Amino acid sequence: MTKAKSIKPVAKVPAKKKAAVVSSLGVLPDSELKQVVKSGAIYAEGGIKPDQIQPASLDLRLGKVAYRLRASFLPGDQVVADRLDDSLVMHTLDLTRGAVLETGCVYLVPLQERVKLPKDLSGSANPKSSTGRIDVFVRAVSDRARAFDGIPAGYEGELYAEISPRTFSVLARTGDRLLQLRIRRGPQTPVRDMTFSLDLHPTQSDIVGYRAKRHSRVIDLAAIGAHTVEDFWEPVRAREGRIVLDPGEFYILASKEKIVIPLDEAAEMAPIAPELGEFRAHYAGFFDPGFGVTHSKGKAVLEVRSRDVPFILEDGQPVGRLVFEKLTAKPDVPYGAAGSYSTYAGQGLRLSKYFEAAED
């Protein structure tokens, strides 16, 4: 009888550990914004339109009503809707039929877009360039917010626009886009910044900027390029590379430097440091990737207001600062590229899109 051979146990090979999936940190480009919309983290009745998605931001649309408020407010630990009672709301305007938002008044408008952000995504809002250039002050408000324009990670609920026209009254309707939303994964982490200066060197036309006229007609937000420049603006000319800002007046000026936003970065114009002067040079400040990359021009257009006293500005004077962040990936369609919905690619001194072309 043959002896059975002993069988040696086969040594177990340890299973390979699955590599952890690490998502890139930074501002989301258009391709990831589409995925966020597809997942339902940003949604709206009727859906999100393709042209709302910019290279690194999403346009937000006004809803059906505007509440005329006694005063601006932050909800603190409350839901915004719970604050909209007779003690705060003076009257309600129907935006589906169009309504005039008047200068010196404060309005709150529920936006069409709502969010249900995952815990790794947060948002920040800013007025669109066309909004800032007509001196309409717009800020985003969310439930239980203790600051404007910030959407905390994991936030679920409605978004609102607080609107305060400063110089021009505007005719607004449901669907108008005054704000844009930037979504980021992880904390806001600037990678660099740059200071830019003012261009007051006279050109062939001798115009270095524009000053808004008081008591002008209403600007119709649906009438792109239909408003006559002379009805709303007077040209500003520099003497020896210098201008004097009148207190409280609103100016459109331009940077001396060309601004270039690399395809793997996004930028935001930061409020000017007070030590640089008694004026403000920032009302709308998102710069998307690709701005200035493929065009010979690409200046920053500045919305400027002197605070309390007349203030002299000189050619080459520092007036603003751009803060850059990394994108999680390059955009599919950069700003100014074919197929983009860009308005101000390759701009010099440029008024808002609501006016006839007036660029130098």
Image (cartoon, helix red, strand yellow):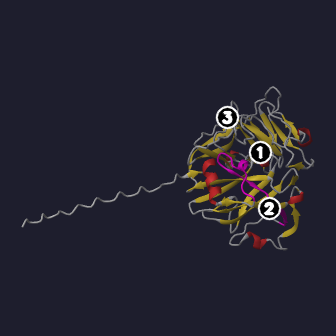
Location of residue 130 in the rendering, given as x and y in whole percent from the top left corner: 78, 46
- Say few, some or many: other residues with alpha carbon within 10 Å of mark 2 (under 14 / 14 to 19 / 20 or more): many
Q: Secondary structure at mark 2?
A: strand
**Residue position for label 2:** 109
**Residue position for label 3:** 258
Magenta stretch: give its range: 46-70
Picture quarter with the C terminus: top right
Q: Which residue is depicted at the point 88% across and 53% down?
A: 171
Disc 3 from disc 1: Cα separation: 17 Å
Amino acid marked by disc 2: Val
Front residue (pair 253, 2): 2
**Residue position for label 1:** 303
Front residue (pair 104, 89): 89
Location of residue 175 in the rendering, given as x and y in whole percent from the top left corner: 80, 55
Marks 3,1: beta carbons within 8 A: no
Picture quarter with the N terminus: bottom left
Q: Secondary structure at mark 3?
A: strand
Q: Is residue 220 visible?
A: yes
Q: How many marks?
A: 3
Disc 1 from disc 2: Cα separation: 24 Å
